[in-house]
Image (tube, coloured by chain):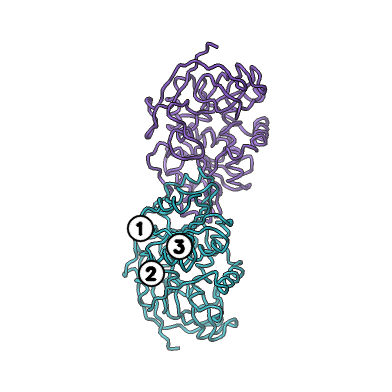
Chain colours: A cyan, B purple
Amino acid sequence: MALTNRAFRLAARPVGQPKPSDWTFAEEPVPELADGQILVEVRYLSLDPAMRGWMNDVPSYIRPVGIGEVMRAGGAGRVAATRHPGFAIGDAVVGMFGVQAWAVSDGRGVTRVDEGLAPLPVYLGTLGMTGLTAYFGLLDIGRPEPGQTVVVSGAAGAVGMVAGQIARIKGCRVVGIAGGPDKCAWLTGELGFDAAIDYRAGSVKAALRERCPDGVHVYFDNVGGDILDAVLARLARGARVVICGAISQYNAEQVKGPSNYLSLLVNRASMQGMVVFDYADRYPEAIREMAGWMADGSLRSREHVVRGLETFPERLGMLFRGENIGKLVLEV
Amino acid sequence: MALTNRAFRLAARPVGQPKPSDWTFAEEPVPELADGQILVEVRYLSLDPAMRGWMNDVPSYIRPVGIGEVMRAGGAGRVAATRHPGFAIGDAVVGMFGVQAWAVSDGRGVTRVDEGLAPLPVYLGTLGMTGLTAYFGLLDIGRPEPGQTVVVSGAAGAVGMVAGQIARIKGCRVVGIAGGPDKCAWLTGELGFDAAIDYRAGSVKAALRERCPDGVHVYFDNVGGDILDAVLARLARGARVVICGAISQYNAEQVKGPSNYLSLLVNRASMQGMVVFDYADRYPEAIREMAGWMADGSLRSREHVVRGLETFPERLGMLFRGENIGKLVLEV
């Protein structure tokens, strides 16, 4: 196998926003397969805000990426060579392949997917980790009831778009918070959100007062910071706040805590964190249900596909500048 | 009835720490009783951190005290005159009598208590609102399991001392956080806590690392601020944080939010607020159980009784300076 791999390896731990020198882009030979391994030609990479957290050397829900290691990333591709009985050449697969063109894997955490049901990038988003995060976070932690008001931040992102649509499917009033008129129009138009709040256009607090006159029963938070505080100030009695992420804080050297957290006391509300990996044994049921919703048109997926493995560092930054609509996917 | 009342009325909304000019101390005639009313000679007043919140004109779990109104406070006393069929002269009663020597009441929210079972001040504390807050906050929201580590802040205060002891009764490892060696010695001595951390003596974070090697399964928070952040950094997987109060923040003009709140995500933990009034229909069962624990010696109560109605403003400040050990009660 005279194949040449191209890979981004972590060169330094970023302080604040990652910069080009935090990476090395290496061309290197693809190793020979050992028994039990497969070689995957990576076609698409999932770009996720959580990746910023994996670059920090702090205890978290997953081991940090080591200096010199290929940057961790979800990927989708096809099996190009196999010495593993469970995979055949040509199989479409998703897994944690890393930011590289070719991945050697022992098959652990690698799932075969059906390209007839949905194109590969969808398996990195709505039928992948971000869709599953939305599904379990909203339904298991948020537990919305029909008629309740559900607010989603980062609503035009990969997780938020799915969380909001599932809330709508479950009969809730859904209010999305996103940056810019295009995202907001998409939320209330194609995705059927009841309202959208453009956090760049004015006071989120005032908009929430107007859009959520009975308070917020479920808040699905992807952003943290000032928006979390604004929603905390509008909680309904007994509200559930799902802490899924905090994209506004991932590059901050000091996280801004929610100064309105005592609203939890006043409103007998709860704030709970979740990590999708805990639901691994229920992924199949969730994917089946979401695929059904996609098939009947009630759940729409949008992938924001950008091209060129070598553009990875720049593309990752798009997430933190709010430049993606839908799931950001890098085509290798 | 030529009785003269003495009462503290709210004169101004405090900014930061309340000052003497925020009150008027009035001598005024006790009104004649109407049909259905009782007159209570107030003997003891409950001094509680929550009273600071009631002085702010913001929406909360209870209506703010109006300017010119008698300051709200729990009290215990005896019925001195009655035109109410449910009460006889001499009945020992507790209720929201306000910061005054004589209270006229229509009997709503007034409960007769048995002085044979416990002295009056105990009904303002361990067998009253603060004990009930500890009971329901710990058992219903914290849900500790035997062998788990329970951390209580404000542990030598009225709520904390009961929460910690109930955790011990339920078979947990209990670590109390309090200010000063006297409080800490009392917690590990008389109250049987497994460990105590003096937050004035050094790094709470380091002490928690040492005292809670397996992390914190339940955190009962009465203080907020830096101590909340320190405990968040030590949460065990699936931990429950009970938000009961935030005494460190009640006089702050800007509340410090917990910057370590993303520990909820990493540890799949929850943070939930509670207000004891929601459990009113279960007060009798809780009081019965706690009275049983007091009778068999497993639950100890301590009242810090100070004297003189006219000293109320100064005594209230003791709570925020951490000068009380146990339940602070003002003897009228």
Where does the image place residue A128, in percent across and percent down from the top left? 52, 71
Q: Which residue lies at the image location 49% right of the left edge and 65% below the top edge?
A: A192
The chain letter for the residue carrying disc 2 is A
On the question of residue B265 being in view, the answer is no
Q: CA distance from mark 1 to mark 2?
A: 25 Å
- Specify the label residue A155 is tagged with: 3
**Between discs 3 and 1, the one toward the N terminus:** 3
Mark 1 or mark 2, whichever is nearer to me = 1
Mark 3 or mark 1, whichever is nearer to me = 1
Q: Nearer the viewer, residue A231 or B302?
A: A231
Rendered position, A227 above or below B9: below
Task: Tell me whether circle 2 and circle 3 mark residues in contact (CB < 8 Å).
Answer: no
Q: CA distance from mark 3 to mark 1?
A: 15 Å
The residue most toward the top is B2
Q: Which residue lies at the image location 39% right of the left edge and 59% below the top edge?
A: A198
Query: Which residue lies under the disc numbered 1?
Result: A201
Relative to B89, B303 lies left or right:
left
The image quadrant where one finds the N terminus of chain B is top right
* Circle 3: element type: loop
Query: Which residue lies under the disc numbered 2?
Result: A316
